[in-house]
Image: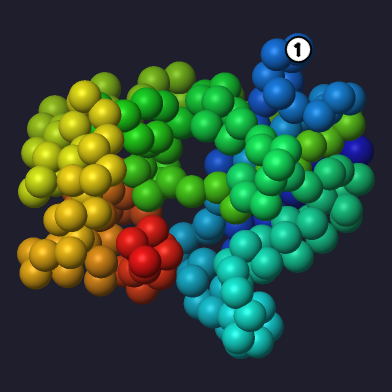
Amino acid sequence: MTGYVDIAASAAGAGLDIFGGFHPEPGDGAPDGTGTLLLLGPREPGFWAIVTAAPEWRDGAADPLDRWSVRVVGRLARDIGGHALFPFGGPPWHPFYPWAVRSGRAFASPVTLLVHDTAGLMVSYRGAIALPGRIDLPAPPGASPCESCAGRPCLAACPPRALTARGYDLPACHAFLDTAPGADCLSAGCLVRRACPVSQAYGRLPEQSAHHMRLFHR
């Protein structure tokens, strides 16, 4: 069976990183017969240039990023004898949040969003690959990056206080985005996600964040 290093290299060639993996147990919600589950996210810097040059982005049809993910993750999965899973297009809906936490590389942040050890609060998952056999996986970091973040700037970054330790006030977020000060979030991405020191080192372009914000706040 193809090993982790080879899979990571193939994913990198497609603009993706392995954002974590684990060996599922009963109750994890993985498909029956899964020996290893790998989570895939954007490889930065460079992801957005790859996606926006792809045929899905140029054909004018809806959901270009999701369609790109289906094609690219699906091909990666087939090449290594696995099965592609996605956080969209359900039902069935796959439990990506618990899977991310299960991998040991993503954690609940002080503002309740997932925070990843390399992507910070900019973490997103384009898909997962379920493999029938067990492959050796790198040891996860074991601790959330928030534990060593002295200032925790995410807690004070949201002007309408829509994202706090109490959770997410969705109406307050949308209401703020309708105001002039909210234009910064719409054009460059959520201020809370951008405040995370790990996010700032990740290399995600404002254009990508703006794309997601347009879909979120139609």
Question: Does the rendering let one see residue 54?
Answer: no
- Residue at 72% x, 38% y is 92
Identify the residue at horizontal 24%, vertical 54% (top origin): 174
Q: Residue at x 36, y 73 (%)?
A: 207
- Residue at point 19% right, 60% down? 177
Q: How many marks?
A: 1
Residue 89 visible to an observer of this rendering: yes
Q: Quadrant of the N terminus?
A: top right
Which picture quadrant has residue 69?
A: bottom right
Q: Furthest-top residue in view?
A: 26
- Name the element at disc 1: loop
- Please identify the quadrant where the C terminus is shown: bottom left
The amino acid at mark 1 is Pro
Place of residue 185 in the rendered image (x, y in percent of width and height, measured from the top left)? 21, 62
Q: How many other residues sit within 10 Å of disc 1, few (<14), some (14-19) or many (≥20)?
A: few
Question: Residue 114's quadrant in the figure?
Answer: top left
Q: Position of residue 125 (x, y in %)?
A: 55, 47
The image's colouring method is: rainbow
Does residue 148 appear left or right of residue 55 in this picture? left
Which residue is denoted by mark 1 in the rendering? 26
Above or below, comparing residue 193 to residue 97 in the picture: below
Residue 206: percent from left, percent from top: 31, 69
Residue 137 x, y percent position in the rendering: 68, 29
On screen, residue 159 versus residue 112, left or right, reads left
Left or right of residue 12: residue 162: left
